[in-house]
Amino acid sequence: MSEPTTAGGPEPFGTRLRRAMDTRGPLCAGIDPHAALLHSWGLNDDVRGLETFTRTCVEALADRVAVLKPQSAFFERFGSRGVAVLEKAVEEARAAGALVLMDAKRGDIGSTMAAYAATYLDQDSPLFSDAVTVSPYLGFGSLRPALDAAAASGAGVFVLALTSNPEGAEVQRATAADGRSLAQVMLDHMAAENAGARPLGSVGAVVGATLGQAGADLAINGPLLAPGIGAQGASPADLPGVFGPSVHQVVPSVSRGVLRHGPSVDALRAAAAGLTEEIRAVVDRAPR
């Protein structure tokens, strides 16, 4: 599936994401085929089970949610056959209209980062996705190959900033030489990348919905991926408290909260629709 184009090249991810959020709602549904979920669906923890699980998720959700987020590790653990399942899922999900965010959390330097960028952000790659998650803690400048590749292909990048796992604070809340937290340093870099973009920049931040209060300036003019709703303890009602005036740019990410309703396609759709409406109601009431 080729990207929509404008006179200046591929339509930017931020533009496509804003449109998808406005029409389909802001929900990002994860596809996390770990062993416990496969077993809860009555599937074996093998490639056949992986394929059935993934195909069901795509069938149920790809034509109605804004974003589908496969976690690549759960496919990679099966080797080349698992990656083949992932490739097919990406292709079919995008063909059905979902934006695919590859949750790979890649981070490295130089030619290695460029290779990761080519894997997920080059339109000729079988794993080309609408966006990918990356880690900036080798320095924000190490992400340049991914940022440039995303801009060239109309894709997006979601950068880890303030994650939902408690251990993240020892790095992300550490203080830089100028007194800012390291997370704020990264957020400020993202804001610079998104400067002038309308209606939304294509460089997003990952900020956990479980934080209570972010304690950071989240006005990056880009999307804010918010994991942590459901199994990790946060709810849609927590979003305004964490994100404040930036809540309208939030893409809440839910995996187990939807997937536990499988393997019924109808039940998966109902769970996603219910969460979408709950999130919309909270966000619509928040001041702009």
Image (spheres, grey):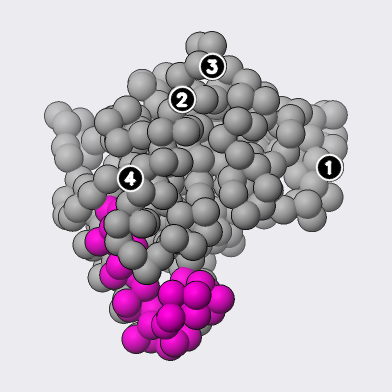
CA distance for labels 3 and 2: 9 Å
- Dot 3 or dot 2: first in sequence order is 2
Pointers 1 and 3 in contact (C-beta within 8 Å): no
Q: In this figure, which residue is indicated by the disc labeled 4?
A: 65
Mark 3: few/some/many CA within 10 Å (<14, 14-19, 20+): some
Instruction: From this view, report whether residue 288 is shown above or below residue 250.
Output: above
Badge 3 marks a residue whose secondary structure is loop
CA distance for labels 4 and 2: 16 Å
Q: Main secondary structure of the magenta part?
A: helix
The reply to whether the magenta stretch includes residue 235 is: no
> How far across and down, in percent of the image, does residue 148 sit?
41, 45
- Identified at 46% across, 25% down, the residue is 281
Instruction: From this view, report whether residue 195 is shown above or below residue 86.
Output: above
Q: In this figure, which residue is indicated by the disc labeled 1?
A: 174
The residues colored magenta run 33-62
Badge 2 marks a residue whose secondary structure is helix
- Dot 3 or dot 4: first in sequence order is 4
Mark 1: few/some/many CA within 10 Å (<14, 14-19, 20+): some
Badge number at residue 281: 2
Q: Is residue 176 left or right of residue 35?
A: right
The residue mark sitting in front, 4 or 1, is: 4
